[in-house]
């Protein structure tokens, strides 16, 4: 018997980065978005928390198999 199991999790990652002094709130947001979009922050991301959301299974009938 073959079963396809699908687990859905929500993964929360955390990075500690330095932000230049003197930026406005929108400047801080833009700095963070720019770091993320450039890929610089991805190397600093650590898994902080994983929340289980759901699990499902689907039985796949193979040729010649009776269920």
Image (cartoon, helix red, strand yellow):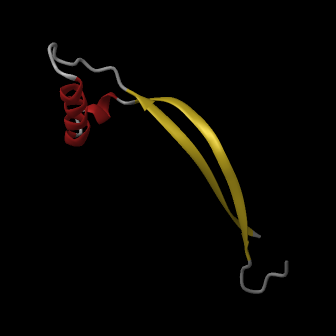
Looking at the image, which residue sits at the far right? 67
Q: Position of residue 61 (x, y in %)?
A: 74, 78
Q: Is residue 48 left or right of residue 38?
A: right
Looking at the image, which residue sits at the far top? 21
Residue 33 vs 6, above or below: the answer is above
Closer to the camera in the image, 17 or 24: 24
Q: Residue at x 36, y 25 (%)?
A: 15
Looking at the image, which residue sits at the far bottom? 64
Q: Residue at x 69, y 52 (%)?
A: 55
Residue 41 vs 8, above or below: the answer is above
Q: Is residue 67 left or right of residue 52?
A: right
- Quadrant in the picture for the C terminus: bottom right
Q: Position of residue 10 (x, y in %)?
A: 54, 42
| Residue 38, quarter of picture | top left
Q: Position of residue 40 (x, y in %)?
A: 22, 34
Q: Residue at x 84, y 81 (%)?
A: 66
- Quadrant in the picture for the N terminus: bottom right
Q: Residue at x 16, y 17 (%)?
A: 20
Q: Position of residue 32 (x, y in %)?
A: 25, 31
Q: Is residue 48 left or right of residue 65?
A: left
| Residue 29, quarter of picture | top left
Closer to the camera in the image, 32 or 52: 32
């Amino acid at each position: 018997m073959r079963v396809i199991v699908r687990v859905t999790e929500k993964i929360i990652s955390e990075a500690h980065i330095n932000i230049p002094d003197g930026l406005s709130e929108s400047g801080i947001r833009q700095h963070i978005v720019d770091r993320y979009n450039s890929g610089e922050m991805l190397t600093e991301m650590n898994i902080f928390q994983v929340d289980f959301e759901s699990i499902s299974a689907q039985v796949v009938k193979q040729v010649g198999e009776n269920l």
